[in-house]
Image (cartoon, rainbow, N blue to C red):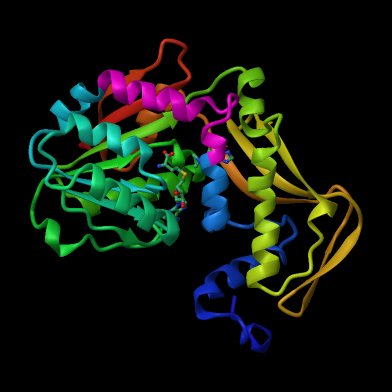
Amino acid sequence: MTLTADVQEVEPFHLEFAEAVLDGLSQRAKHIPCRFLYDARGSELFEDITRLDEYYPTRTEIGLLRTYGHEMAKLAGDGCAVVEFGSGSSRKTHILLEHMKTAAAYVPIDIDDASLKEASVRLEQQFPDLPIHPVHADFSQDIDLPEEIGDAPRLGFFPGSTIGNFNLDVAVEFLARAGALLGEESGLLIGTDLQKDLDILLPAYDDAKGVTAQFTLNLIHRINRELHGNLEVERFAHKVIYNDEIGRIEIYIESLSDQNAEILGRQFSFSEGERVHVESSHKYTLPQFRDLAAKAGWGSGQVWTDENDLFSLHYLTRA
Ligand code: SAH
Ligand code: AVI
């Protein structure tokens, strides 16, 4: 959509957000892309989520990296540049790098500059001999890797099941683009959450302390702050469902009453119970994910899962 005069007062950095919100809230099925959940506060709240009892993915994947990291490092080989998509706090990278004694460089890529800077400083202290080249970018667009990494073989690292936040076609596009970026000789170590009982899955996205609700509703604060919105946060709620047909968690901001709000001088109305879709989190079986990777030109190698089959880490190579 083309932005008109009412958006002139938005700072250039917020333009993309403005466009996405105005467009997404003008649709019949309202939606806002999930990458906008990660401003500085959103990233902090996500870190809090990773420490919740109900949120099994982070601790399970960390367990896999600790137990099998030596096997992953061996498959990647010596002298790799590790390129991480959606690096966030880089908390898991630390474990991988401990196993990869000969990594040539680390390239964290993230849309949130604050967490990127903080994580890079911390990793520089932990690995003083490792060149670190942070890239502040949207990984759903084309990205250039820093020239400094030269022609070192690349290991892509995409933990957290962040791939699950993409719709299936977008996931295939992303994986194909990542393949072109990393090159023919590269590997990709990628975390994917597995399908499981709803009594484990639903609380992971709707925790008792309400931290995930704060993470979702932080988007309203961001709209109010960056886009001159006047939405009343207490008149909206965090809503989670499991879409059985697609095999994914869906997260919505639900309106608790009929109401109107203004964003960048435009009026939006929300009816009671109306939902704004803000995130999906796909859960894959191992064969489903292998098929998806194959469509993007990645061949499946080893896969590691925990004893409760909660989470998986796949090592993919260019097919
Ligand atoms: N890798 C970490 C963080 C996962 S949270 C872990 O496994 O725990 C998802 C991360 O991806 C966040 O740090 C968020 O800022 C980043 N992110 C989300 N969408 C993005 C996009 N389109 N481009 C770049 N980074 C993105
Ligand atoms: C980053 N991503 C993989 C998380 C997930 O589990 O889909 C985001 C999240 N949203 C709410 N809780 C966690």
Percent position (x, y) of residue 286?
40, 23
Q: Is residue 177 visible?
A: no
Give the x, y percent position of residue 205.
Answer: 63, 33
Q: Going 24% across and 42% down the picture, which residue do you hit?
A: 126
Residue drawn at point x = 22 percent, y = 36 percent: 97
Indicate whether 23 appears above or below 183: below
Stretch in magenta: 48-68
| Most common SS among magenta residues | helix
User: In this view of the protein, which residue sits in the foreground, 247 or 214?
Assistant: 214
Q: Quadrant of residue 304?
A: top left
Q: Is residue 20 above or below residue 54?
A: below
Residue 224: image location, x then y, percent: 71, 67
- Residue 116 painted magenta: no
Residue sitting farthest toward the front: 125
User: In the rendered view of the protein, which quadrant contains the C terminus?
Assistant: top left
- The reply to whether residue 14 is in sight is yes
Looking at the rendering, the quadrant in which ligand 2 lies is: top right
Residue that sits furthest to the top in the current view: 307
Give left or right: position of 166 versus 178: right
Please give the count of numbered marks on the rendered protein.
0
> Quarter of the image holding residue 157?
top left
- Residue shown at the point (37%, 62%) measured from the top left: 137
- Nearer-the-camera pick, 263 or 176: 263
Q: Is residue 239 left or right of residue 100?
A: right
Q: Is residue 15 above or below residue 289?
A: below
Percent across and percent down for residue 61 are: 40, 26
Residue in view at x 45 percent, y 15 percent: 309
Position of the N terminus by quadrant: bottom right
| Most foreground residue, 190 or 44 | 44
